[in-house]
Image: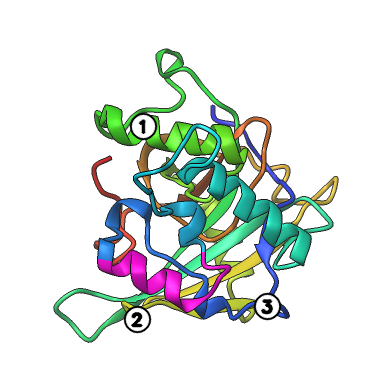
Amino acid sequence: MAEVFPFQAYRFNPARVDLAKVLTQPYDKITPAMQERYYALASQNLIAVEKGKAYSDDTPANNVYTRAAQALKNWITQGALVRDAAPSIYIYLQDYQVPHTRERKVRKGFIALGRVEDYAGGVVFRHEQTLAGPRADRLELLRHTRAHTGQLFMLYADPQQRIDALLEQASRAPAPVEVRDEYDVVHGCGRWRMRKRSSVSATRWQTRSWSSLTGTTVTRPRWPTAMSAAPRWAPPTPMRPTRR
């Protein structure tokens, strides 16, 4: 059974930045034109970390990964990124239009830390054979920044719908933070604060398969890895999982 944990995330401070101007799509969906547009939106746009520009005169001491690490440090120093005071599990909502219809749906999930598991243990299952180049790129970014800006998107079994019920209850209140992206997807984020005897911390969550997404919550774990989760598959949206 997979183990998940609350954590203290670094999040963009709406008093210092316009949240709509710092959001990006997942790194493997960002075209050169999108990259340029994100850079032009704000100096704190996540593009500087998620998919920064590489230059012909880059060196081991000054390159896309070192600049990403420096950007995070600068934003924390400036107060653009602020760490939450208490460990939480983060409720994540995506309000999107179903392709080829006028119907809108809301996908409910959560962002938490998850213990790193060997595939041989049968706890976490890979969803595809990922490519060597993107793996090396993301690992190098992680080594330099010591932060996850792109969570792992995972599916899990919940036959008794205990987690569904918790997500439904938590999502009844308006999301404290909402941002609409360029594809008309509304992203909402809130927090479950963990208490010793809370129903959330007492629940064991079992996972069954993985894929990948990028979110905007910045985590700085030593271990385990950061992840976001959704209880069941939903029709593809602009922030859909893709081959990496």
Residue pictured at 37% horizontal, 28% vertical? 125
Looking at the image, is 46 positioned above or below residue 178? above
How far apart marks 1 and 3 lie (CA) works out to 32 Å
Residue pictured at 19% horizontal, 74% vertical? 99
Q: Which three-letter amino acid code belongs to the residue tagged 2?
A: Asp
Report which residue position mark 2 lands on.
Answer: 184
State whether residue 148 appears in this view. no
Q: Which residues are magenta?
A: 33-45
Residue pictured at 74% horizontal, 50% vertical? 8
State whether residue 38 appears in this view. yes
Specify few, some or many for label 2: CA neighbours under 10 Å numbering under 14, 14-19, or 20 or more: few
Looking at the image, is 188 positioned above or below residue 119? below
Circle nearer the viewer, 2 or 3: 3
Residue at the far top in the pictured view: 120
Q: State the colouring used for the structure image.
A: rainbow
Q: Quadrant of residue 31?
A: bottom left
Q: Is residue 22 left or right of residue 193?
A: left
Report which residue position mark 1 lands on.
Answer: 135
| Residue placed most toward the observer, 160 or 94 | 94
Q: Earlier in the sequence, mark 1 or mark 3?
A: 3
Mark 3 secondary-structure assignment: loop
Q: Which three-letter amino acid code belongs to the residue tagged 3?
A: Pro
